[in-house]
């Protein structure tokens, strides 16, 4: 995959292909996404409250559809967080990503450095990052979020080479990745995150990683979160397809069943459900729907 050195831009590049499959339904997605903007300026979480994490996905989905976000409203919301003081790790990284999605014009250089300093407080002794301070080792998800945040802030990550070493410690014998040390079973999303991070860090992956991901395909389409999961889900599907594309592993043989799976989660309201048992629409899963469709568009 010829991609920018940013997994945010990389995924946006792919999601922009989704309208080829959506056709006229793209306008329904646009309408749904704009309905998720709260009076405070952030995109709504599942309780209807503005949230930085969901704002990431709302902004990126609009960018994928080439629809202009209500910048003045959203930027005013983002500026209330300054350099992120008081935010947890995920929301600090989300703040950096939201600003990047608005072109970086609404955050000062001092706030960028302050946000990077905050993210650095989640660094672990092994060189990785974890969403909880004080952990001895990093998580795969934490590593990807931190690396992405530094890119979004356009700042160099201190000792970036140590991040790859921390990631390598999470590899399991079957080719999958555990999110944290000591876990005996990998997950699809964690393995996909490890693939993306390792590729950007030019760090070698186990030979069986791609094969393990393909084994998680459900007979009815979509990917399972773990080998023992009862149902496939959209997050696992989108991230697995992205990882397989990055590994240059063909997945044309599962294209039709994956399209059928995604279609089963689509609603005329313009959003996507996360899985067959889900009954709530949000910007996050709609974003993953666009990413998955982008990978399946050709």
Image (tube, rainbow, N blue to C red):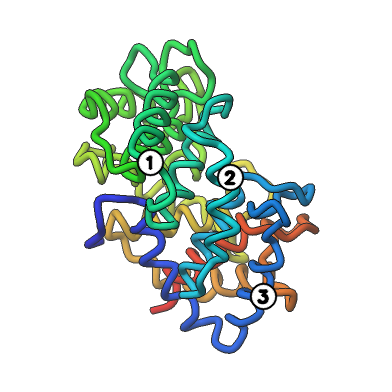
Rounded to the nearest angstrom, the CA distance separating label 1 from label 2 is 21 Å
Numbered disc total: 3
Residue 267 in picture, x, y percent from top left: 72, 73
Q: Which residue is mark 2?
A: 53
Task: Locate residue 150 relative to residue 213 in the image: left or right.
Answer: left
Task: Locate residue 192 relative to residue 229 in the image: left or right.
Answer: left
| Residue located 35% across and 30% down the image | 113
State the image quarter where residue 260 is shown: bottom right
Q: Of label 1 and label 3, which has the lower sequence position?
A: 3
Quarter of the rendering occupied by the N terminus: bottom left
Q: Is residue 267 above or below residue 98?
A: below
| Residue located 53% across and 62% down the image | 71
Residue 248 in picture, x, y percent from top left: 27, 60
State the image quarter where residue 251 is shown: bottom left
Q: Is residue 277 above or below residue 161?
A: below
Q: Which residue is mark 3?
A: 31
Residue 70 in picture, x, y percent from top left: 57, 65
Identify which residue, 157 or 85, lies in the foreground: 85
Rounded to the nearest angstrom, the CA distance separating label 2 from label 3 is 20 Å
Identify which residue, 193 or 105, lies in the foreground: 105
Rounded to the nearest angstrom, the CA distance separating label 1 from label 3 is 32 Å
State the image quarter where residue 177 is shown: top left
Mark nearest the camera among 1 and 3 is 1
Q: Secondary structure at mark 1?
A: loop
Q: Secondary structure at mark 2?
A: helix
Q: Which residue is mark 1?
A: 108
């Amino acid at each position: 995959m010829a991609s920018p050195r940013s997994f945010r831009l990389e995924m946006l590049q792919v999601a922009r292909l989704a309208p080829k499959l959506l056709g006229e339904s793209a306008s329904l997605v646009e309408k749904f996404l704009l309905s998720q903007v709260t009076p405070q300026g952030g995109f709504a979480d599942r309780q209807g409250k503005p949230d930085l994490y969901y704002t990431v996905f709302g902004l990126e989905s609009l960018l994928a559809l080439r629809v202009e976000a209500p910048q003045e409203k959203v930027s005013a919301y983002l500026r209330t967080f300054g350099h992120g003081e008081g935010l947890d790790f995920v929301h600090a990284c989300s703040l950096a990503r939201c600003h990047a999605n608005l072109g970086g014009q609404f955050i000062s250089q001092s706030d960028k450095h302050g946000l990077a300093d905050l993210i650095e407080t989640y660094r672990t002794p092994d060189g990785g990052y974890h969403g909880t301070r004080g952990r001895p080792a990093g998580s795969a998800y934490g590593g990807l979020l931190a690396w992405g945040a530094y890119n979004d802030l356009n700042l160099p990550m201190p000792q970036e080479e140590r991040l790859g070493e921390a990631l390598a410690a999470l590899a399991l014998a079957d080719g999958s990745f555990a999110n944290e040390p000591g876990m005996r079973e990998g997950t699809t999303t964690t393995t996909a995150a490890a693939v993306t991070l390792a590729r950007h860090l030019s760090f070698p992956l186990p030979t069986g990683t791609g094969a393990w991901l393909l084994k998680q395909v459900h007979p009815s389409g979509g990917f399972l979160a773990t080998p023992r999961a009862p149902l496939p889900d959209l997050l696992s599907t989108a991230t697995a397809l992205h990882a397989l594309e990055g590994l240059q592993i063909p997945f044309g043989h599962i294209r039709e069943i994956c399209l059928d799976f995604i279609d089963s989660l689509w609603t005329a309201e313009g959003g996507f459900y996360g899985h067959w048992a889900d009954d709530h629409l949000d910007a996050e899963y709609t974003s993953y729907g666009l990413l998955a469709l982008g990978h399946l568009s050709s």
